Structure formats: C-alpha cells, structure tokens
Image (spheres, rainbow, N blue to C red):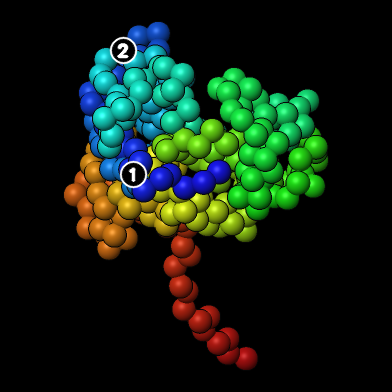
C-alpha cells in the first residue's frame, strides 16, 4: 500500500443538511460539516447524540432522509453509493472482535475486499497490509480469537486500508481497548495518515482522544450540531457552548478534593 501519487491530491468530504430517521425517530437532524483533504476531523458527544449514525450515513449503512454527502478535492470523484465510492471510503468499527468474522483467518479477512473490488497481487498486498499495521506474516493464518484486542483492531485497520482508500471513518476505534493499547493504535493511525495523506473522520466520546488525533472537531447533542471548534481552542478551553464545557468537565473525570491533615488528638 503506497501513498497517493503527487498528482493525486487527497480527498475531502462535504456533508450538508444530513437527516437520518429510524421509524419516526430523528437520529440526525440537519448536520453539516466539511473535512479538508488530508485533515483529521473529530465528532464528539454523549451516547445517543447521533455521532456514529453520521458515520454510518456517510458510508451508506444508515439511510439518509435528507441532505447530501459528497467527496471533494478532485474532479473525478465517485458518487456516494457506487462501488468506486466504497473503495475510497472505508470504516473501522468500535468493536475489533465483533467486526471480524470469527471463522475466517486474517488472510481470508484481508483477501475478501480484494476479491469483491478486484485487485492484482493479492498475496503481496496482504503482506504489505500486515506489515504496515505492525503485524508480520506470522499473524496471517490466525483466527480473531487467537489475537489480542489491539491485534484485532490492527487487522481491522489493515482490512480498511487494503483497498487504498483516501477517507477513513473511525467509529471509536480505541474505546474497547486497554489504555496502554489505545495509545499504540492512535499513534499507528496518525502515522498512517501522515504517510498516505489520508483524511479521517473520527467519532469518540473521549475528548482527550479526539484532541490528540484531530485538528478540528464537531460537538453533537440529540442529533444536532452544538458547535465546531479547533482542537487547540478546545485544549485552551476557548469554547462557546455550555454543553461543550460540560463535556470537558465530564471528560476530566472524578477528582477528589484535597482534605486537610487530621487534627492531632490530645492524650
């Protein structure tokens, strides 16, 4: 898997007025945002805010009731829903075990996208994919249950990248992993983005994770956009919405107030 050619600029994304409805429940209501080519963009919010549904609508796994989704950055970009679009836009899911077929080896998991979309030199591409995510060919014929959580997520990332997409959708890719493994996967994703000129849209409820990986982010609540802010401004607490401030407070976690030293008892 090689980086995009110099004459092939990266791909961006433009979402306008996105609305997703499930059985009369409005999960996403009028969401608009834009991701520049090569940018890492985050979406944060509490559980049920609609952030994962936005990703699913972008890749075609959730029905759009209204609005548009379009790739940007080049004149020859495919339309959403087409086979070519699915080659350019790939998704990494939250649960690295549930997203991998338990009865398929890593080799077959990585070969399947190539069989569907076509691609020469499948053997070499599978080996390169494993190497690029830090797994050698010794993992090629293992099953998901023989891998750790971090290794399974690396396989999921390799599967998403093996078609050489330019836009990667990340649905809480580290939330199911131990804290020590989270940093490894985040650093891997950032290295891959820099090396290949990828664009990211990353969903998370963890503000620390998003500010580490993303340059800008969008805050969602009850299916709507609360505000968009640069990660640097978020880190400096330069935000406009009270809801964003409450997320920041919640993300800081529980802090015990310091207690004074106990008074000495008289004998």
Side (left or right) of 144 relative to 187:
right
Considering the image in quadrants, where does the N terminus appear?
A: top right
Residue 19 lies, with reference to residue 76, above or below; the image says above
> Does dot 2 land on a helix, a strand or a loop?
loop
Considering the image in quadrants, where does the C terminus appear?
A: bottom right
Is the C-beta separation of discs 2 and 1 under 8 Å? Answer: no
Residue 208 lies, with reference to residue 242, above or below; the image says below
Name the residue rendered at 23%, 41% in the picture: 227
Residue 48 lies, with reference to residue 228, above or below; the image says above
> Comparing marks 2 and 1, which lies closer to the viewer?
1
Query: Residue 85, image x and y in percent?
Result: 41, 24
Name the residue rendered at 38%, 43% in the picture: 199
Residue 266 lies, with reference to residue 6, above or below; the image says below
Q: Mark 2 sits on what residue?
A: 65
Side (left or right) of 55 relative to 144:
left
Q: Is residue 113 in view from this perspective?
A: no
Residue 7: which numbered mark, if any?
1
Where is residue 50, by image quadrant? Answer: top left
């Amino acid at each position: 898997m090689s980086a995009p050619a110099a004459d092939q600029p990266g791909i961006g994304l433009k979402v306008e007025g996105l609305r997703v409805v499930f059985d009369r429940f409005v999960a996403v209501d009028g969401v608009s945002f834009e991701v520049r080519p090569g940018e890492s963009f985050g979406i944060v919010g509490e559980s049920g805010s609609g952030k994962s549904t936005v990703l699913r609508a972008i890749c075609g796994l959730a029905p759009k009731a209204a609005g548009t989704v379009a790739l940007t950055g080049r004149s020859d970009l495919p339309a959403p829903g087409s086979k070519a679009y699915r080659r350019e836009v790939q998704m990494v899911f939250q649960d690295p075990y549930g997203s991998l077929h338990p009865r398929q080896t890593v080799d077959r998991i990585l070969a399947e996208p190539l069989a569907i979309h076509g691609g020469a030199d499948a053997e070499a591409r599978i080996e390169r994919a494993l190497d690029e995510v830090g797994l050698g060919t010794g993992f090629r014929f293992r099953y998901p249950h023989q891998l750790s959580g971090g290794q399974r997520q690396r396989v999921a990332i390799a599967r998403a990248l093996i078609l050489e997409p330019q836009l990667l959708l990340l649905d809480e890719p580290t939330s199911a992993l131990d804290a020590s493994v989270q940093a490894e996967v985040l650093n891997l994703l950032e290295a891959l983005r820099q090396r290949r000129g990828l664009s990211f849209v990353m969903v998370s409820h963890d503000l620390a994770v998003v500010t580490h990986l993303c340059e800008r982010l969008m805050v969602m609540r009850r299916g709507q956009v609360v505000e968009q802010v640069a990660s640097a401004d978020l880190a400096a607490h330069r935000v406009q919405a009270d809801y964003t401030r409450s997320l920041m407070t919640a993300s800081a976690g529980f802090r015990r107030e310091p207690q004074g030293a106990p008074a000495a008892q008289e004998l």
